[in-house]
């Protein structure tokens, strides 16, 4: 029932409710022959405020919305209402990708807006003061998702029922700074939905990066440029306390806009909130300075890399719920991680289990987690293969030279005795790993990228102990080129990973199956696109250069049966915000330090609306640094599964593989695949195995096998640990900076461009022995 008409409806305040606790979904689902079959829910209205106190009137969902929501989405909105409206705090909505988090937020905001307009005192008085009056909603998201937010509001909210929530203010649409300023002012005056990216938020709070140095915000000793305010703004400024004293300078425009962003929102939503991964980053500080406590963090991957990311998100939505970071690290992080390795002792495993249980207990009221297991019966099957190939002769030659030169350059000496002593700190660690990654993709890509970088950096001095690209190029690529000739780099056969991809694509073309190919490297996408074009295979593509407004049009075209069957996608740029269920095959061509990026990529195809079985092909080059990265990914996935999903996967991570990034190429043994192939009849996989390129195949499902239980004694120890935690909790002062008037001139500059996941990989992988 639409809440706009509730005053004239005798049923609105007299909805007959038989229960006062969360009701099970009234949607009946079944899975027949791999296709999702959905039976519409019954007309009985769902109630939003199911946790209301006695005597408080029920608030029904608008029926035009509730009829289209799944049970998990109904529960999510009820959770958000409880935490945001009833408890006047924040919430972490952690439904996995493809489960409709955006629709839940739009539904919540629509209900709040309609309740505020109610003529029934028993209804509108249920809202806290900050959610009364004009709604000023701030949504911060990756820029590529802002257009999707607008579409979702228009999809779920009737055009005539709520004009305010259909007013969108997107400063990023304006290139002129003055016009952007007017967008902020218009939103401040009228209310509505302000949509902006994380970097723009940071820049308006602390100033653009090129104007921030040497300190954040205004550099010390430098006056901010003053700008005249419009008459209205001057009036508002006077009313805020200037008293019209002309001896005082008016706000600068930067200060005015900063105050609008920090003080005006009544509710703020952080989409893809795992961006809040470091409490000392300007991104996190910007969000923390926003005054409202009505904060919603949205993420399908609340624990993408490490527990600090999880801690930062939780601390943003519920400051003080967890102990200060140092205490949290000692009480939770160290014991939990110590028990997740294959080599962990029984005592470490037991302690890890208890601390995990306590952490989940503490977070139970503030996080609402739903993963695909809750809607698995609505989805077709998904099978993931981790396919191991070996280095080709040319790759092995370059790889050996590269790691040897990097190690020697960082040591500054080559004698064997020195190599046995002292850990080696690798300078330029991530640059080197990225270089090796594109080498494993194909030597031609490596050659071209390195050649360009060598030319650009050849005359620049290298960091002490760190080769310039020109020197590395000369000692690795040029050495091979002299031995075997320039043309040796061009042939696709010099990468088994690439040859496997081409076989998958060519057979998919014959079968008329659509394939998504994800890579972390744009030069790799360029090479693949050129090679497929030479084979007469049409492709479409989404990467960081694709404008957000075009992405939906590209995916819509891809859904067309007459369009291209192959879509090439940059993992970072296209791994979120896209619905591409026309594809039933997904190739994770390469990977970086964040396994959740790969999960997000797979979620473009494996989501609600998918009708076909989905096959995922991940590639790993055995005997290289990718063995160590795969091991680290297993650790991260195990940690996320235990902390967030309460599952108990098999411990596959090994302690001894933390520092194997710059070892010489190792052996890649051939596994017996005959029994495996008897069970899995996928024709694409059979073709790969028949080619002789595949050395081994693992199923990713091994992450889902349980191996731990908590017995009665463990439960007693759990209570003892819980008592110990209560003694650690007390007043905290590390969030004093949340005051919107805090001095921000002394904040440390942080490298915001660092990839997700690299911070903890650097700690664990940047040195070898």
Image (cartoon, grey):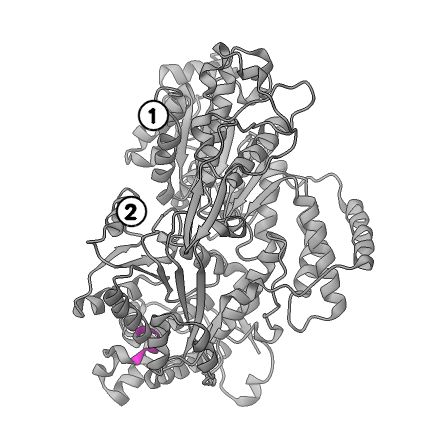
Q: Position of residue 633 (x, y in %)?
A: 52, 65
Left or right of residue 245: residue 459: left
Q: Which marked residue is nearer to the observer: mark 2 or mark 1?
A: 2
Secondary structure beneath disc 1?
Answer: helix
Among the two numbered marks 2 and 1 on one chain, the one whose residue lies closer to the N terminus: 1
Quadrant assignment, res 529: bottom left
Q: Position of residue 314 (x, y in %)?
A: 60, 43
Q: Is residue 100 above or below residue 603?
A: above
Per the model, the C-alpha gap separating discs 2 and 1 is 28 Å
Secondary structure beneath disc 2?
Answer: helix
Number of the label disc, if any, that sits on residue 371: none
Left or right of residue 202: residue 554: left
Range covered by the magenta-colored residues: 494-498
Residue at point 45%, 17% (across, down): 4
* Magenta stretch: dominant secondary structure: helix
Left or right of residue 505: residue 316: right
Number of numbered discs: 2
Q: Position of residue 74 (x, y in %)?
A: 52, 35
Q: Quadrant of the C terminus?
A: bottom right
Q: Which residue is mark 1?
A: 182
Q: Is residue 515 above or below residue 321?
A: below
Q: Which residue is mark 2?
A: 551
């Amino acid at each position: 029932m639409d809440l706009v008409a509730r005053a004239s409806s005798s049923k609105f305040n007299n909805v007959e409710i038989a229960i006062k606790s969360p009701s099970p979904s009234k949607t009946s689902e079944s899975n027949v022959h791999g296709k999702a079959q959905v039976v519409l829910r019954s007309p009985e209205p769902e109630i939003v405020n199911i946790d209301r106190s006695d005597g408080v009137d029920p608030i029904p969902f608008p029926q035009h919305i509730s009829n289209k929501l799944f049970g998990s989405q109904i529960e999510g909105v009820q959770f958000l209402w409880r935490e945001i409206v009833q408890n006047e705090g924040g919430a972490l909505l952690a439904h996995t990708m493809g489960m409709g988090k955006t629709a839940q937020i739009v539904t919540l905001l629509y209900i709040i807006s309609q309740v505020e307009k109610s003529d029934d005192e028993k209804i509108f008085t249920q809202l806290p003061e900050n959610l009364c009056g004009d709604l000023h909603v701030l949504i911060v998201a990756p820029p590529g998702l802002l257009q999707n937010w607008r579409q979702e509001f228009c999809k779920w909210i009737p055009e005539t029922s709520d004009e305010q929530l259909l007013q969108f203010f997107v400063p990023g649409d304006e290139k002129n700074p003055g016009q952007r300023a007017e967008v902020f002012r218009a939103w401040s005056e009228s209310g509505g939905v302000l949509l902006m990216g994380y970097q723009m938020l940071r820049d308006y709070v602390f100033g653009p990066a090129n104007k921030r140095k040497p300190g954040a915000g205004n550099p010390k000793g430098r006056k901010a440029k003053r700008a005249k305010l419009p008459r209205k703004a001057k009036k508002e400024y006077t009313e805020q306390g200037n008293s019209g004293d002309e001896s005082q300078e008016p706000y600068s425009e930067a200060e005015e806009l900063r105050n609008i962003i920090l003080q005006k929102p009544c509710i703020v939503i952080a989409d893809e909130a795992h961006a809040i991964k470091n409490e000392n980053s300007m991104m996190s500080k910007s969000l923390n300075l926003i005054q409202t406590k009505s904060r919603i963090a949205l993420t399908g991957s609340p624990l993408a890399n490490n527990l600090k990311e999880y801690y930062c998100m939780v601390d943003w939505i519920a400051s003080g719920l967890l102990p200060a970071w140092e205490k949290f690290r000692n009480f939770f992080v160290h014991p939990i991680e110590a028990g997740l390795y294959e080599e962990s002792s029984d005592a470490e495993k037991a302690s890890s289990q208890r601390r995990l249980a306590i952490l989940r207990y503490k977070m139970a009221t503030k996080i609402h987690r739903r993963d695909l297991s809750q809607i698995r019966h609505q989805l077709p099957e998904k099978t993931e293969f981790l396919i191991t190939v070996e280095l080709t002769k040319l790759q092995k030659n370059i790889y050996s030279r590269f790691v040897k030169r990097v190690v020697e350059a960082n040591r500054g000496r080559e004698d064997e005795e020195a190599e046995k002593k002292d850990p080696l700190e690798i300078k330029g660690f991530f640059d080197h790993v990225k270089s090796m990654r594109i080498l494993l993709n194909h030597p031609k890509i490596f050659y071209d990228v390195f050649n360009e970088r060598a030319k650009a950096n050849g005359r620049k001095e290298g960091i002490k102990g760190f080769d310039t690209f020109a020197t590395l190029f000369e000692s690795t690529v040029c050495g091979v080129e002299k031995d075997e000739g320039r043309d040796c780099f061009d042939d696709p056969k010099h990468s088994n990973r690439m040859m496997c991809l081409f076989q998958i694509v060519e057979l998919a073309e014959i079968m008329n199956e659509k394939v998504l190919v994800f890579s972390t490297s744009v030069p790799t996408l360029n090479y693949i696109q050129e090679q497929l074009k030479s084979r007469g295979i049409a492709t479409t593509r989404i990467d960081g250069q694709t404008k957000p407004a075009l992405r939906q049009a590209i995916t819509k075209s891809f859904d067309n049966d007459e369009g291209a069957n192959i879509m090439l996608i940059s993992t970072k740029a296209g791994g979120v915000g896209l619905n591409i269920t026309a594809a039933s095959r997904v190739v994770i061509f390469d990977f970086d330090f964040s396994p959740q990026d790969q999960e997000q990529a797979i979620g473009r195809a494996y989501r609600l609306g998918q009708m076909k079985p989905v096959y995922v092909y991940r590639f790993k080059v055995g005997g290289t640094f990718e063995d160590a990265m795969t091991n680290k990914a297993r650790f991260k996935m195990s940690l996320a599964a235990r902390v967030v999903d309460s599952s108990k996967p098999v411990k596959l991570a090994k302690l001894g593989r933390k520092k194997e990034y710059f070892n010489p190429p190792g052996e890649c043994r051939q596994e017996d695949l005959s029994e495996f192939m008897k069970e899995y009849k996928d024709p694409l996989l059979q073709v790969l195995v028949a080619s002789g390129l595949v050395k081994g195949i693992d199923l990713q499902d091994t992450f889902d096998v349980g191996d731990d239980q908590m017995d009665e004694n463990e439960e007693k120890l759990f209570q003892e640990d819980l008592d110990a935690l209560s003694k650690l909790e007390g007043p905290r002062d590390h969030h004093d900076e949340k005051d919107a008037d805090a001095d921000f001139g002394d904040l440390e500059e942080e490298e915001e461009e660092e990839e997700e996941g690299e911070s903890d990989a650097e700690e664990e992988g940047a040195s070898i022995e």
